[in-house]
Amino acid sequence: MNENSCSFHGEKELRDGQVESVCAAYPSPYDKDTSVLRVLRGIPISELKNHGILRALTAEANGWQPVVSAEVLRAQEEWEAVDNIQTEPGSQASVDQPGQLISFSEALQHFQTVDLSSFKKRIQPTIRRTGLAAIRHCLFGPPKLHQGLREERDLVLTIAQCGLDSEDPMHGRVLQTIYKKLTGSKFDCALHGDHWEDLGFQVTGANPATDLRGAGFLALLHLLYLVMDSKTLLMAQEIFRLSRHHIQQFPFCLMSVNITRIAIQALREECLSRECNRQQKVIPVVNSFYAATFLRLAHVWRTQQKTIADSGFVLKDLEVLAKKSPRRLLKTLEIYLAGVSKGQASLLGAPKCYGPHAPHSKDLTFTGVCDLPPHSSEGRAHLGLPREM
């Protein structure tokens, strides 16, 4: 063994304080390993950290570098990049981040800040009346909306002209939020796919945007309001459960779109003007009217044992009632939400049962407020429904 080998191992501190040279006692490589074991057996555990041999071995080990492949290094860099992402509240990165729930006010603010001039040109704020209908409305109809509230009304009608844009991150977040709140899922889902049928979209080409005709993005904002407002979330979940009843099943989201259509028509016919003037607000009144109308539909559907075959006629009767007595519907909603906050039983009542063999929504034929045959007494002309917006 050479001098470097001897100096590498140094001296050993024994229990009695004596020092013995490793090289002198164990000159061969094989004997050296045996000698190290014998010496270490005689050293107290508390003294091992101070032993020269262990210090040398530790120093040698600290210089060892593992061989890491380029693929592992790339994966480590990607993970560290994910771990270091930090978004500040209100930043654009936070707004567009997938997987993050969006509130109704945040989505509304988006429409308040973007240019909607091309969509605003299409709206017809009020119903045009001529002849005796105009005179009758002037004498006996509801009051006109206050001048200061007309811009807010126009914004509601303009949003109803906007379609769903899957390339817009905000639009995607609205859809994801609705899906997660109704299904309880914690994960994002594809913006196109058959899974939207589980929520009651009768999608064409697996795209929920095709079901928004006549209500536009306002239909999604109303659903967002329903699921993100703590006062109405329980109601939304109750109606969603009712929509999945094995006999009384109906397409939840498509029914909601039709409720939004009724709200749009009631606003245009000035049926909500009195309440808007009283509250000095338009959007909150329209939201509450939508929720109250949906609650009324669910109550009728549940208590009168309605099925999908009755949908068109139920919606027709509902529209007549909603336009005639909006304040009555709003009061019913107020009572219901007060009861929910006190933990009282649901006004809808518990559905009798839910079966695993319920028909899929795509197998159902749903008749909306715009789908009744024009030659019937319940047709479109009788309803006074708007043209496709």
Image: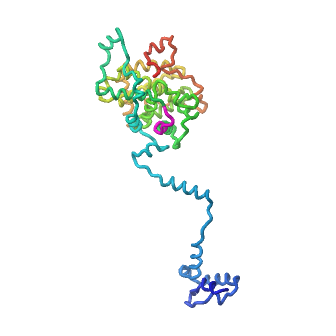
Q: Residue 59: percent from the left, percent from the top?
A: 57, 76
- Residue toward you, 35 or 303: 35
**Residue 153 location (% of width, % of height):** 35, 27
Camera-side residue of 71 and 216: 71
In screen coordinates, is 102 left or right of 328?
Answer: right
Q: Position of residue 164 (x, y in %)?
A: 49, 32
- Locate the C terminus and report the quarter of the image it occupies: top left
Q: Which residue is drawn at 45% across and 52% down?
A: 86
Q: Give 90 or 235, whichever is nearer the viewer.
A: 90
Q: Where is residue 383 in the image (x, y as percent from the top left)?
A: 44, 15
Instruction: Please determine whether, in this image, residue 131 is positioned above or below residue 327.
Output: above
Which of the 4 quarters of the picture holds residue 127? top left
* Residue 267 within the magenta-colored segment of the rendering: no
Above or below residue 81? Residue 17 is: below
Q: What stretch is highlighted in magenta?
A: 164-172
Is 15 placed above or below 294 here?
Answer: below
Q: Quadrant of the N terminus?
A: bottom right
Residue drawn at (58%, 83%) of the image: 43
Q: How many marks?
A: 0
Q: Which color mode does the image show?
A: rainbow
Does the magenta portion include 165?
A: yes
